[in-house]
């Protein structure tokens, strides 16, 4: 039985250097986030940027919903993969970071594809459901306390074979520590079990960044 390669910083750099070249504005967002201190951990990993770009391309995705935008790296990574008539709705309640993200989208000439809704994400999700909106893909990377709620509402917003992708499901490796009773760690552990047992989807966890769960609606 083969074993997974342990990814150190050198290998991670090698992978990034030999993968799809990032857009100049993606690089600018990364540099911006480097100055934000500890909060920069909210940014997705470069490997996740590449993965999201590729899966959108090969699945012919045209309409995306993002729950949690931060300064826009994940949003822009997905938008750049969309066709010219593609659409991405991004939900985030933080007006300050949403404004920063929107400025990056304009610099990348992607503002025609991206619409940011700046209010409580659960309220926005209920509004989208009420309006019978449907998406090909939902990307969840927001407050962990509501992961189960976001997942449940997202299932109503995609059709059969639609994808739900969730970030941070390995939670810095803490999910394997049976003695870790931290609130957020427990929430992620319980969420992962919930998704695994859900017969409405099939799922797998990929060790990209802080862990991505990929769910396909059955």
Image: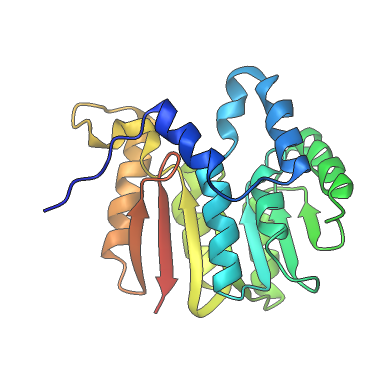
Residue 178 at x, y percent in the picture: 18, 32
Residue 11 at x, y percent in the picture: 41, 33
Residue 175 vs residue 187, the one in the foreground: 175
Residue 97 vs residue 122, the one in the foreground: 97
Residue 196 vs residue 31, the one in the foreground: 31
Quarter of the figure with the C terminus: bottom left
Q: Is residue 45 visible?
A: no
Residue 143's quadrant in the figure?
top right
Q: How is the image coloured?
A: rainbow
Residue 153 vs residue 112, the one in the foreground: 112
Q: Is residue 28 left or right of residue 207?
A: right
x 82%, y 48%: residue: 105
Residue 147 at x, y percent in the picture: 47, 50
Residue 101's quadrant in the figure?
top right
Residue 120 at x, y percent in the picture: 68, 48
Q: Is residue 41 visible?
A: yes
x 43%, y 27%: residue: 9
Residue 186 vs 2, above or below: the answer is above
x 76%, y 34%: residue: 28
Residue 217 vs 172, above or below: the answer is below
Q: Is residue 208 left or right of residue 103?
A: left
């Amino acid at each position: 039985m083969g074993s997974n390669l342990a990814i150190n910083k050198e290998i991670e750099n090698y992978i990034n250097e030999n993968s799809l070249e990032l857009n100049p504005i993606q690089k600018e967002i990364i540099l911006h986030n480097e100055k934000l201190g500890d909060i920069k951990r909210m940014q997705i990993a470069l490997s996740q940027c590449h993965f999201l770009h590729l899966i959108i391309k090969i699945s012919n995705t045209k309409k995306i919903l993002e729950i949690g935008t931060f300064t826009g790296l994940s949003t822009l990574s997905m938008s750049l993969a969309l066709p010219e008539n593609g659409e991405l709705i991004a939900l985030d309640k933080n007006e300050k970071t949403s404004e920063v993200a929107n400025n990056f989208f304009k610099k990348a000439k992607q503002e025609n594809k991206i619409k940011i809704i700046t209010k409580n994400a659960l309220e926005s999700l209920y509004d989208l459901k009420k309006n019978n909106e449907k998406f090909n893909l939902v990307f969840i990377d927001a407050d962990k306390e509501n992961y189960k709620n976001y997942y449940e509402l997202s299932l109503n917003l995609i059709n059969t074979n639609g994808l739900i992708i969730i970030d941070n499901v390995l939670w810095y490796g803490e999910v394997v520590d049976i003695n870790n009773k931290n609130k957020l760690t427990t929430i992620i552990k319980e969420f992962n079990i919930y998704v695994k047992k859900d017969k409405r989807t099939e799922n797998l966890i990929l060790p990209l960044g802080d862990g991505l769960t990929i769910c396909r609606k059955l």
